[in-house]
Amino acid sequence: MSVPGRPETLEASRCTACGRHSLPPGPRCPHCGAGTRLVEVGRGGRVLSWTTVHVTPEGVPAPRTVALVGLDCGAAVLCLVEGGRVPEMAGRVEVRFADGVHRIG
């Protein structure tokens, strides 16, 4: 999620025990199970993987490309790739959150 009034950042969870970040934010760390707190993280990261989905549920446009982005904070987030482009593996991207979806492009 984007931080209201701070479009250059995203909201993530940071574990109070192991210190790892996760997206989407949640009350428990997916790595160790400890509690988390909400923090702001930068939107920058690198494309870890991507795929184009050709078969989608009814009402969802196809084809659509999604990418797994490793944020600089260490969290990974699945993003919709906009603009019909093919992401470059390990390429730098900026993630934004709009209409309930993380997006790049």
Image (tube, rainbow, N blue to C red):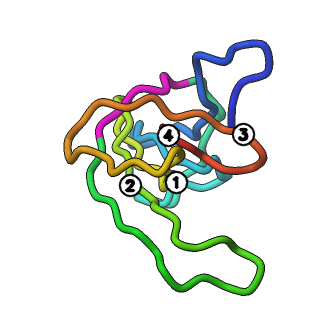
Q: Amino acid at mark 2?
A: Leu
Residue 74's place in the image compared with 77, above or below, is above
Q: Which residues are magenta?
A: 41-46
First-in-chain label (2 vs 1) = 1
Q: CA distance from mark 4 to mark 2?
A: 10 Å
For residue 54, the mark is none
Instruction: Give the residue pinned by disc 1.
Output: 29
Residue 93 position in % (x across, y down) = 38, 32
Q: Main secondary structure of the magenta part?
A: strand
Position of 87 with respect to 4 (left or right) is left
Q: What amino acid type is highlighted by mark number 1?
A: Cys
At label 4, counting other C-alpha atoms closer than 10 Å, the crowd grade (few under 14, some 14-19, many 20 or more) is many
Secondary structure found at label 1: loop
Disc with the residue nearer the chain's start (4 vs 2): 2
Q: Earlier in the sequence, mark 4 or mark 3?
A: 3
* Residue corresponding to mark 4: 104
Provide residue 57's location: percent of width, then percent of height: 67, 85
The label number, if any, that marks residue 68 in the structure image: 2
Does the magenta segment cover residue 5?
A: no
32 relative to 52, above or below: above
Seen at 63% across and 32% down, the residue is 11
Disc 4 vs disc 1: which is toward the camera?
A: 4
Which one is closest to the eye, mark 3 or mark 1?
Answer: 3
Q: Residue furthest front?
A: 84
Please identify the quarter of the rendering in which residue 28 is found. bottom right
Dot placed on the residue nearer the N-terminal end, 4 or 1: 1
Check contact, mark 2 vs mark 1: CB within 8 A. no
Q: Is residue 11 above or below residue 27?
A: above
